[in-house]
Amino acid sequence: MTSEKLRKVFLEFFKERDHTVVKSAPLIVKDDPTLLFNSAGMVQFKSLWSCNVSLPYKRACSVQKCFRLTDLDKVGRTPFHDTFFEMLGNFSFGDYFKKEAIEWGWEFVRDVLCLPNEKLLITVFKGDKEAYDIWKKHIGLPDEKIFRLSKKTNFWGPAGTTGACGPSSEIFFDLGEEFGRKEDGCTIENECERFVEIWNIVFPQFDRQKDGKDKPLRNRGIDTGMGLERTLMVCQDKKNIFETDLFQPIIESIEKGEEGLSKRIIADHVRALTFTITEGIIPSNEERGYVVRRLLRRGLLEGKKLGYEEPFLYTLVGDVIDSMAQAYPEIKEKVEHTSLVIKSEEERFLNTLDSGISIFKEMIKGLRREKSQIIPGNYIFKLYDTYGFPMELTEELAADEGFTIDIEGYKKEMKKQRERAKSATKFSGEIEDLLWNGIDKKSRFIGNETLSKETTIIATKEIDKNIGLILEETPFYAEMGGQVGDTGIIKGDGLEIEIIDTQPSPYGNVHIGKIVNGNPQEGMKVTAEVDNDRRMDIARNHTATHLLQAALREVIGKHIHQEGSLVAPDRLRFDFTHFSSLKRDELEQVESLVNKKILSNIPVESFETEFEKAKKMGAIALFDEKYEDTVRVLKIGDVSMELCGGTHIKRTGEIGLFKIISESSIASGVRRIEALTGRNSLQYLKTLEEIENTVSQILKVDPGKIEERLRNILENEKNLFRRIEKLEKKINSYEVKSFEPEKTKEGIQLIIKRVTSQSPEMLRNLADETKRVWNKMSIGVFGTDFNDNANIVVFVSEDLTKRIRAVEITKEVARLIGGGGGGRADFATAGGKKKEKIDEALQAAKDFIKKRLT
């Protein structure tokens, strides 16, 4: 029985019994915020039991891809635990119930899989007499085959915190005394590895509410789960799931090390990585991305135990696809993307892995000296912040050494980091700390309707030598969601205040300004006027940011999601998840697509709706952002729809022109694009045009021939450098012959000289030439200044390297010239910033050599 055949016979069995075959749902659950990943076959059917929707069918069967981390520490250590797995299930929604479900389950296990009766055992919930009677009286099993267990093991669900749940009945397979004996306390009740659960029939009778109470389900039914990997292990007569055809091809491709725990963990993790990344999850420090990053780095650590020093997990993706693509063709379509993401993340972590492990070992040594068995929170934070070790990874490494970790201390360090980031903003720290007395209502923002408003001052406060005002109503937008705060003027009777920033507060928008005239008082009538030109520049950039995200998702992929942004009057900045730099043609496509939407002059509309309704409409929300029940949606035709409270233009044509000026990396898996719009993009192009004209005049060619002219100049320069280098080498060879070494008492010849400015390459050539001529009992030290830097080269003839090494001499002089050095026993170099110390360094080298050799 192969894995492919097992999937096939299961679906055929239930299709013959009038079940609709339903395709596996994605691992990412769209409509259930209580689940990060699809963790059971019944997840996609939850609403059919609670009767929230009309029933498309009353019977269904599926093979569902699932992902759980609940048993991560057991993966590879037990015969049957894994993170990514497949759940084969048959389901009833208000149709058949316990009798048919038990009958068909037993029939499939006995007659289709042909598992021996003497190896099969049954469990039921001790309060479920109906299920017990069916097994005993209808199926005909004796009492000793049926175990009545508690709610802990035999009451299932819900998947998440709400939804369908109910008692369950399981079929176990007895692997035999090799896996545990009754005399040693091995029973079906204590999760002994001898007994493997292969079939679990849940009887959804209740609907778990948010308050934890269970209401009767309107469509009570059946939720069966048969773990593919476990059942296959039993059918193929293997000792664990890793010996089946689902894992063996992967394990066989792991070339280094012996087969064992590390290879089993790697095989499991690379399966999970392949499926999660295929669905668009990118390793990151947030939610699903954090889980993927943790698995990947965990797999890398296991690879290191086997002897891998380079990225290797990505090479196993092909083996996963070979064994799984027939059942899940989508993973084959994304093979290149998946491999690149994994390889990129491997490279990033390997850059810091060795250093991190060394630091960890030093921490452990120090704690042992202090007789402590707990790793402090600040240590854990350092490993995370500096070396990329997820807290859970440190916890596992600590457990291997017999240590525990201070999780609360780690959380405090993370909180401090967030506070440091928060205090780095211009005024927000001061604003939040201020107590505004006498405010009984919150200021209202009206800046989407007007940029000028007659209003009343309701509070004032000094803020960092500036004045802070809160108005009854204000057109000034406060910094939020990446958009900077408005500036402008507030005027009244004898009063004028230049507003330099606007920040949010619990009381409303706070206007921070410099007093030009007058003295602001509470209750004073004023006119608040936003800088119109600046606001329009900001609005152009904000709407363009939405178009940019839409274009990136179209050109690069749907896995793109926002990690941060800055919407300022002079530019926009957009940070997004992606595993590699964008190619030039990709950037051109993105830029062209945005400008195409600008030229189309698409209407930009905003409206308020319920958060859940907005999500169902397809509006993009920031993954880690907390939203109110009512949200503002910004819609740009059929191009973009996002949750956004910022200010925007009315039609895309008002943006004018969109120009990308840079693309870079700001963190692991996070890219940044900076761009200009409107008058700023025109000024940018004007500056480029002026540069082009200036270069054209200098080179005395038409603008269209600048590139050709520059290439010719560079080629000529390259040829000249080659000729100069050739001449310098000839000069060096002649100069060497004129050297007169200083001889020591032991007959060692010292050639220590400062030479006229030479490049580091030519200085090395001079040393090589000298060593070639003076190749016995000789030491040479040469120094020069080049491009305002000090350079020193040392050689030691082979017959002296056991007495003194060149690298020892460079280390001695490097500190004097303010730099560093390195090399071999016979040849070494040093460089530094202090060119004025060259003579002193050469003398120090001579003194060091004589002292060592006497």
Image: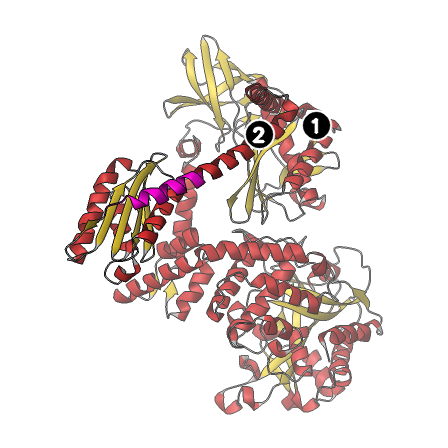
Q: Which residues are magenta?
A: 725-740
Q: Earlier in the sequence, mark 1 or mark 2?
A: 1
Measured as percent of width and height from the top left, residue 339 is found at 62, 58
Residue at mark 1 to residue at mark 2: CA–CA distance: 39 Å
Image point (64%, 28%), residue name: 648
Residue tagged 2 = 710
| Crowd class of label 1 (few under 14; some 14 to 19; many from 20; radius 10 Å) | many
Quadrant containing the C terminus in the rendered view: bottom left
CB-based contact (under 8 Å), mark 1 and mark 2: no
Mark 1 sits on what residue? 652
Q: What amino acid is labelled 1 in the image?
A: Thr
Is residue 666 among the parts visible in the rendering? yes
Within the magenta stretch, is there residue 726? yes
Mark 1 against mark 2, which lies toward the viewer?
2
| The N terminus: image quadrant | bottom right
Q: Which mark is residue 814?
A: none
x and y percent of residue 714 in the render? 54, 33
Quarter of image, res 600: top right
Q: Secondary structure at mark 2?
A: helix
Q: Is residue 264 magenta?
A: no
Question: As drawn, is 168 to the left or to the right of 385?
Answer: right
Q: Amino acid at mark 2?
A: Leu
Residue at (70%, 34%) from the top-left corner? 592
To which quarter of the image does residue 674 belong? Answer: top right
Label the magenta part by its dominant secondary structure: helix
